[in-house]
Image (cartoon, grey):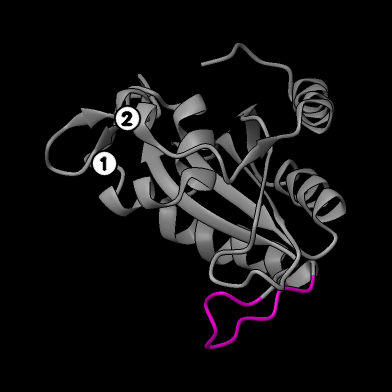
Amino acid sequence: MRAIISIGSNIRPAENVRKSIALLSKHVRLLNVSNVYRSPAENRPDHPWFYNCAVMVETDLPAERLRIEVLAPIEADLGRVRTADKFAARTIDLDLVVCLSATNGAPDGTTVAPDVLNHPYVAIPLAELGPELTVGKGGIPLGKAIERAPRDAIEALPDYSAALSRYVNASHPCEKP
């Protein structure tokens, strides 16, 4: 199965995003990584800014096992503490956003939830890896849907993005999907 994982951090973000991808590479095959974007913490202007990106991976694990056996332990290893406050600062946040068919990359009965468009820091990196993914029941391609996404609150980090991309390409060289 191919999957896209959204990654975010606002506690030592440069270090924790890099570490999370390194830890992921021990459990899944890294195929591609989006650009990394810096954005303010949602509903918390006093909190540090986030780094956000998405990574496409390939694994033999089904989605639920990927979440439980890989993503949750990586979050724990990097010191993630979950609280009732969904806007709390975090060392790392790894979310399985979409699962794709292992054979042709086509959506495996899953479309992207429409609320992803309310969060450009998730939608834009996701669209870089899967512009053909559809949004909600309307079936609008994500690449088209994000054309209207506000970009004034996010800032691309080209140097950091390039370094992550080099790491992904060096750790598991493969053809890009």
Disc 1 element: loop
Name the residue rendered at 80%, 55% in the picture.
13
Name the residue rendered at 72%, 58% in the picture.
49
| CA neighbours of label 1 inside 10 A, class few (<14), some (14 to 19), many (20+) | many
Range covered by the magenta-colored residues: 79-88
Which residue occupies the foreground of this view, 78 or 40? 40
Name the residue rendered at 48%, 52% in the picture.
96
Question: Does the residue at mark 2 contact the one at mark 1 (Cβ under 8 Å)?
Answer: yes
Say which label, 2 or 1, has the lower sequence index: 1
Locate residue 150, reporting x and y percent. 45, 39
- What is the tally of numbered marks visible in this picture? 2
Residue at the bottom extreme of this rendering: 84
On screen, 76 above or below 67? below
Q: Name the residue under label 2.
A: 133
| CA neighbours of label 2 inside 10 A, class few (<14), some (14 to 19), many (20+) | many
Q: Name the residue under label 1.
A: 111
Q: In which quarter of the image is the N terminus?
A: top left
Locate residue 18, reporting x and y percent. 81, 45
Q: Residue type at mark 2?
A: Leu
Image quadrant where residue 32 sits: top right
Image quadrant where residue 175 sits: top right
Disc 2 element: loop
Locate residue 53, reporting x and y percent. 62, 41
15 lies left or right of 164: right
Q: Residue type at mark 1?
A: Thr
